[in-house]
Amino acid sequence: MLLCAALVPRESGRRVPLAPWLPAASAILSLAAFWFLCRLTLADRHLRSALIYAAVGDTRAEQEFGEAQLWNPWETDFRMARAKHLHAVAQSLTHPERRRALYEEAAAIGREALRLRPAQIDSYQIYGTSLMLSTLEGVPNRLAEAEAALDHAQTLDPAFTPLIANRIKLARLTGKAGKRDQLETLYNRLQASA
């Protein structure tokens, strides 16, 4: 109703009638804004729960990450947290097939992040890092794709040190000593200036 009052022109001493659609439009806009805020609040609540569960090693973390992503599918930070969680769980396992499946799931999260937010550095970081880790577990032919994703992420943010650290690891895996040396120099320069 406040929106209606703000949109109605006033003349001194005379009451101006409201357009019949204005109160309905105001109510619809208010409900839409309320629903959007509820979605964001629920997503944040599920993410907090997921991070708490992950910190104590509770298996409910994955379900909570999924719920957070469901309520706010456009938030790349949620996907990044979920992928990091999958990486951590995979690294704690001894069964190679299960580790491989978790890295592949994290890569799928990265692919979906790229589809929704192609200009976001974290989308490429999730995808490239997950592909690199799945290669370490025996999934063939993923290093070139991982390198392309991480290289593209570097063009989006040339000074992002966690990304540079992953690119150094990848350069070691691919045996590209010149690229590794160049990235290590950049990494050390950025760390010294921080």
Image (cartoon, rainbow, N blue to C red):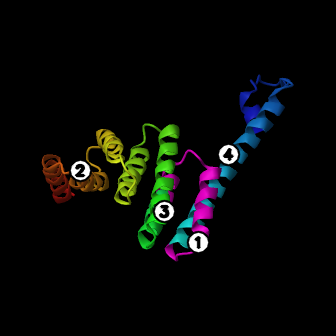
Residue tagged by mark 2? Answer: 174
Residue for badge 3: 86
Q: Are the residues flagged by discs 4 and 1 in contact, CB closer than 8 Å?
A: no
Q: Which mark is residue 59?
A: 1
**Contact check, label 1 and label 3, Cβ < 8 Å:** no
Say whether disc 1 or disc 2 marks the residue closer to the N-terminus.
Answer: 1
Amino acid at dot 1: Thr
Label 4, on which residue? Answer: 36
Q: Is residue 185 left or right of residue 146?
A: left
Q: Amino acid at mark 2?
A: Thr
Instruction: Name the element at disc 3.
Output: helix
Badge nearest the viewer, 2 or 3: 2
**Above or below 21: residue 175:** below
Q: Earlier in the sequence, mark 2 or mark 3?
A: 3
Hey, what amino acid is under mark 4? Answer: Phe
Q: Earlier in the sequence, mark 4 or mark 2?
A: 4
Q: Main secondary structure of the magenta part?
A: helix
Q: Is residue 81 visible?
A: no
- x, y (%) of residue 19? 83, 23
* Rendered image quadrant of residue 150: top left
Q: Residue 48: horizontal and vertical position, in percent?
A: 57, 65
Q: Nearer the viewer, mark 3 or mark 4?
A: 3
In the picture, which quadrant includes the C terminus?
bottom left
Span highlighted in magenta in the image? 55-82
Q: Amino acid at mark 3?
A: Leu
Determine which quarter of the picture holds residue 8: top right
